[in-house]
Image: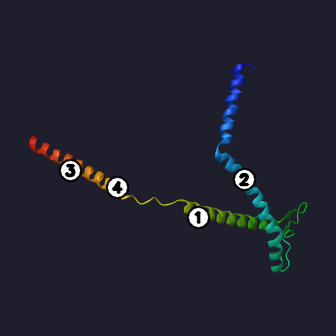
Amino acid sequence: MDKKNKSGISTILNEFKQFISKGNVIDLAVGVIVGGAFTSIVSSLVDDMLMPIIGMILAGINFKDFGITIPWGNEPFINIGNFIQAIITFLLTAICVFAIVKIINLFYKKAEKPAPKPTKEEELLTEIRDLLKAQNGVTTESTAITDTNQSE
């Protein structure tokens, strides 16, 4: 390899290191991994616990075998039960994620403290500043009025 290729590769590697070391990329990777694990937990909850109970309540329906067989062709089976399980899994996952985000937002709101009340000195300095601004505005207006009267 010549020097030009080596410097180009090292530049790309340095840029990649900077990209990976950013907090957002790491946070996103952790979120995807935890989200995948959480989805498998919710899927197991729906498939192994909720759907058998719902099946017993609905006259002993087994949702794994619940579907429609199409009579023509090679008799394909449309598995409606799996689709219903996927919908329930999605809804439970969405509800759990929503609840987690709400709880995290509550912690962030509690962590943010309101701005401290200004001290007496700060209040006096603010009043002085406002008075000076008002005086400058009056001086400018009175100068403008005087200039207009003199030009007439």
Q: Which badge, 2 or 3, is on the more N-terminal residue?
A: 2
Looking at the rendered image, the quarter that the N terminus falls into is: top right
How far separated are the C-alphas under marks 1 and 4? Answer: 34 Å
The reply to whether discs 4 and 3 touch (Cβ–Cβ < 8 Å) is: no
Mark 1 vs mark 4, foreground winner is: 4
Mark 4 vs mark 3, foreground winner is: 4
Q: Which badge, 4 or 2, is on the more N-terminal residue?
A: 2
The amino acid sitting under disc 1 is Leu
Location of mark 1 (residue): 106
Q: Residues within 10 Å of mark 4 (few under 14, many from 20)?
A: few
Image location of residue 66, percent across then percent down? 85, 70
Location of mark 4 (residue): 121
How far separated are the C-alphas under marks 2 and 3? Answer: 61 Å
Say left or right for 114 vs 47: left
Q: For residue 12, what is the image quadrant?
A: top right
Q: Identify the disc placed on residue 143.
A: none
* Circle 4: element type: helix
Location of mark 2 (residue): 32
The reply to whether discs 2 and 1 touch (Cβ–Cβ < 8 Å) is: no
The amino acid sitting under disc 2 is Val
Mark 2 vs mark 1, foreground winner is: 1
Of residue 137 and residue 77, the one placed in the foreground of this image is 137
Q: Is residue 84 visible?
A: yes
The residue shown at (70%, 28%) is 10
The residue shown at (48%, 60%) is 114
